Every structure is written in structure tokens, then in C-alpha cells.
Amino acid sequence: MSQVLGKPQPEEEDDDEEDELVGLADYGDGPDSSDADPDSGAEEGVLDFSDPFSTEVKPRILLMGLRRSGKSSIQKVVFHKMSPNETLFLESTNKICREDVSNSSFVNFQIWDFPGQIDFFDPTFDYEMIFRGTGALIFVIDSQDDYMEALARLHLTVTRAYKVNTDINFEVFIHKVDGLSDDHKIETQRDIHQRANDDLADAGLEKIHLSFYLTSIYDHSIFEAFSKVVQKLIPQLPTLENLLNIFISNSGIEKAFLFDVVSKIYIATDSTPVDMQTYELCCDMIDVVIDISCIYGLKEDGAGTPYDKESTAIIKLNNTTVLYLKEVTKFLALVCFVREESFERKGLIDYNFHCFRKAIHEVFEVRMKMVKSRKVQNRLRKKKGATPNGTPNVLLE
């Protein structure tokens, strides 16, 4: 049995540390942002398709695929904590659904769910506007259905999108694999991978890279796949990975993840390979900590938040491994795997964590200043007017 120590352990106060600095989610992109331009005519807190700063401030992720492939279910399970069984009652999407994932999470982007029956390459549909500001395109294929039509649509979508925006990350979710045997999963992935890349080679587009993932909403595979998609959209990823490598090498830690607490997406990990079972244990630990904190972590009047700067947890497994969770920001948590003998030097680990936490805040403080500067330039560009191709009429200093 696992032992859970749920009592928060207070840290030393650091007056110089800004506890409210949380990274991308507080850059003023939400609906309450004071940076929104009231004269822009766009929806509050959302940048225009044609805005050259749109991708920099808030990347866009497109969910595409044929009807009933599971696109809406993925979104509901990952970002709305819907039970997988409840997705059986979701109605089929019949219009483009756009959602901002930024107000309660570190992960900060717009996600667009496209109905499978819409032909967005119709001449009346300006697909160039959509692909121009896209960071990642996720194409969902139902592995339990005949996927030949899906592969044809994938090829058409990828080739058209690449002509508009060569920087798009193309991700293929081979979905609903929970109903397949292990051998069938591998064979299906190999077949889809081979056919999709052969189609691109026949079109002379070998330079387009497709990433493939086996996913299901009934296990943690969908969260791990989305983690890898989101990581490609985080410009600070190499810095975060380097900080984690330094932290674990100096603390005797075997594995460390930097998690977005709300979505359970890990935005960074160290350079050692990720084991699925390890990731699942981390997700379960976050659920335990949040659930217990919601019961015992609030004040008597219900005030406060269940996850704050004093949140910490230790779970001792029966295989001489310790899971150690510490709050990094109000949206991020560090989850570590430590051997019991190494955890005896907890003081060293806590000191190194304090240095790591301070470095994380400094990384995003630089990013925050850069994004705010870009927003100022963006507002100036709108006020001064722009040429038809989106470039300012005046030089911005």
C-alpha cells in the first residue's frame, strides 16, 4: 500500500520572490485582460486571424478529422475533466468550436474543433486565414474504423496547410486504440505511418514531418500525446529541460516532471526517457493532492485556494520509491521520483528546488516582458493602420 502524507510543509519566505508570476497564463490574454484593444472590433481577449502577433501571443491548435473520430471527446476529457464514459452522450459537432485554454491553466492557446462534415477547402471558405496563425494541427484517425478515407483527408489537409504555413507541427492521433490488442495497435500504427508518408513522398513533399501517437481517452495516453504537442509550442522548452537536468543531477533524483496542474499535461521533463507507468503515477498523485486539498486545505469559511505556494506532498510506494510534489507556481507543480536512500537528503533536495523555482520565475519574467512589448507594438500597428498584407504603414521603434 502507498502512504500519503498530505499535510503541507511550509517553506521559508522569500520577500524577493514574486509568487504571482506564473508564466504564459498571466500575460493578459484572457477575457479580463486590460491589454485588449476596445477599438479593434475583435472578440475581447482574442486576436484576429490575420494578426502577425497572434501565434506569438497565443498559439492556435486545430483539431481535425472525420466525423465521429473522437475530436470533441478528446477536448472534453483533457481540458474539461469530463469522465470518458460521459463522452458517449456528446452530440456530434456541427459547427466550428473555438475555446481559449488560458484562464485557469498555464497552458495558453486557442483550440479549434472542426466538424468532420465541413469542407473547409471550399472556395467560399478562407482556409488560408486559419492555417496562417496555427501552431499545431492535430488530425484524429479512428483506428477501429476503415481509415482509408481519413488518410485521404489527412493528405489533403496537410498539403494545403503546409503551402500556407510551413511552420505548422503536424500531429496524427491514432485514436480509440483501447479496443485493439497490443499487436493490432502496432500493426495499425505501422500501416498508417507507412501509407501517410508514402502519399507525401508521391507528392514530392518528403520534407513534411508527421508525428504519430496511439491514443485513448480511457487511459493516460491522450494526456501524454497532448503533452508532447503542447511542448513544441513552448519556446522556453530547451531552457526548462536544461534546468530540470541540472536539478535532478545535483539532487539524486531519478525522474522529474513539470506539470500543468489543471490539465495534467507535463510541459517539460528531464532528458531521461519517459515511462508510461511513471507518467500515470504522477497524474494520479496530482489528483490525490488536489482532492485532499479541496477537503482539508481550505479555510473554515471556504476561502483560499486548494493549491498554493505551500502545497507539497510525499507518497512512499512499496518499491522503495518516493513521489515528491512541490508547487512551482499557482499553475505548475514539480513531481519527482526519488529513491528512499536519496530522499534522506531532503534538505539538499529542498534547497536545490528553491534555486530551481527561482530560475523558473526568472525565465517566464523575461518572456512576459517580451510578450507585453509585442502587444504594445500590436496596438500601435492597429492605430496607425496597416497595408493589405498586414505590415504596418509606419516603422515601429
Image (tube, rainbow, N blue to C red):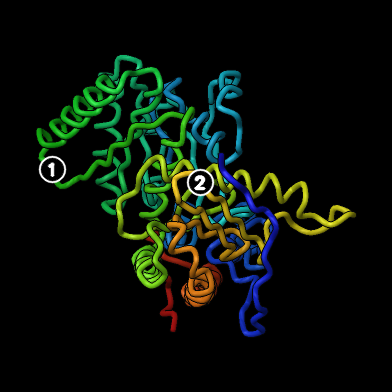
Estimate how packed mark 1 is, as few (under 14), some (14 to 19) or many (20 or more) residues with alpha carbons within 10 Å: few
Residue 136 percent coordinates (x, y): 37, 47
In the picture shown, does residue 182 fall above or below 136?
Answer: above
Q: Which residue is mark 1?
A: 206
The amino acid type, in three-letter code, at marker 2 is Leu
The residue nearer to you, when weighing 327 against 129, is 327
**Residue 370 visible within the image:** no
On the image, the x and y values in percent for residue 4 come to: 62, 48
Q: Quadrant of residue 148?
A: top left
Q: Secondary structure at mark 1?
A: loop
Q: How far from the left and from the top, in percent, is residue 226?
A: 42, 43
- Position of 173 with respect to 362 (left or right) is left
Q: Where does the image place residue 16, in percent across and percent down from the top left?
A: 62, 85
From this viewpoint, is residue 180 visible?
Answer: yes
Up the image or down, 380 lies above or below 269; here it is: below
State the separation of the CA atoms marked 2 and 1. Answer: 47 Å
In the shown orientation, is residue 6 left or right of residue 59?
A: right
x 41%, y 65%: residue: 387
Q: Which residue is mark 2?
A: 317
* Nearer-the-camera pick, 244 or 228: 244
Residue type (three-letter) at the residue carrying disc 1: Glu
Give me the residue at 36% from left, 64% from top.
241
Extreme-right residue of the structure: 301
Q: In the rendering, which numbered label is found on residue 111?
A: none
Residue at (60% x, 71% y) in the render:
21
Upstream in the sequence, badge 2 or badge 1?
Answer: 1
Snapshot quadrant of residue 277? top left
Number of numbered discs on residues = 2
Query: The N terminus is located in which quarter?
Result: top right
Q: Nearer the viewer, mark 2 or mark 1?
A: 2
Taking 193 as reference, is 66 above or below it? above
